[in-house]
Image (tube, grey):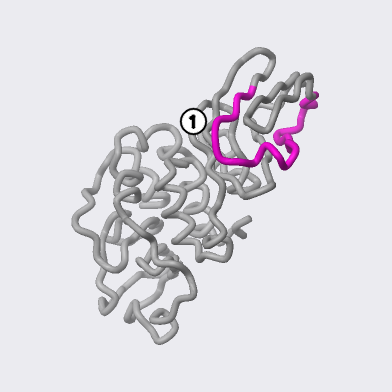
Amino acid sequence: MRYMAWLMALMLGCFAVPAWADMVVVAASGETDHLPGDTLAPTAVLTLPDGARVTILSQDGKMRVIDGPFEGLLEDENSKKSTSPVPASWDALKVLLGDPDARSNVLGASRNLDGAFRIPASIWHASVDSSGPRCVRQSELTLARRDASASAVVSVRSSAGRITDISWPKDQTTLTLPSDFAADGRLAVSIDADLRTLTLNTLPEALKEALPGSLLTWFAENNCKRQAIALIQRIHDGVEVN
């Protein structure tokens, strides 16, 4: 079985990322010879057995999920048209797929609920389980935590101001902040005096209606690794992206 092969490949660094072609495999599961990082020409003929699935990203921002049995060309008339901005650079995606720091628990995790990485309810939830970059939408900021077994007292501080003594109830994994705090820059979050520092990057206006691949590239460029992997997982698993 090569189920969840893409996560294992990311964790173990089992593939190299050469000069990128027009299309690249970002996820693979089932009995297939294709692995994440494999590059494919648009004119290539793809063959997949029954039960296999691959997710392919093209430079125009499209992410295509293909299920076996399948044999045919990757490019069709529809794939030649795109209303989404072309990603400015694929370099960040190379880092995401090849950087040892990216092959940590975040990428090498199970999809099970007790795994080290869980698919969040939304790719836009800003995790406070650690410090680091987070990608958010304008005027919308929701914090998320894995462990909601106890209530917590939260304080936040940014250029927008400061709020103290916010109650984060037990069994609630998310906490929505006032929209003013969803702005580029540093956000300090204190949870029961445990400080997390987040660097927020707000989604550009030009990407509001972008295709998933363009959004994935933006996540990678801003080092929002958890959100990038959550997006890949959702696309590959056929889960709504929200």
Q: Is residue 187 magenta?
A: yes
**Residue 137 x/y as whole percent:** 62, 49
What residue type is disc 1 on?
A: Gly
Residue 206 % position (x, y): 53, 62
Which residue ends up furthest to the bottom in the rendered image?
A: 77
Q: Is residue 211 left or right of residue 124?
A: left
Residue depicted at x 57% and y 59%? 205
Q: Nearer the viewer, residue 162 or 217?
A: 162
Left or right: where 39 falls relative to 26: left
Is residue 1 visible in the rendered image? The answer is no
x and y percent of residue 103 in the render? 35, 36
Magenta segment includes 125: no
Circle 1 SS class: strand
User: Which residue in the structure is indicated by mark 1?
Assistant: 132
Q: Is residue 220 above or below residue 164?
A: below
Residue at 50%, 66% (x, y): give it: 211
* Magenta segment: 167-189
- Compared across the picture, whether 241 is left or right of 61 comes to right
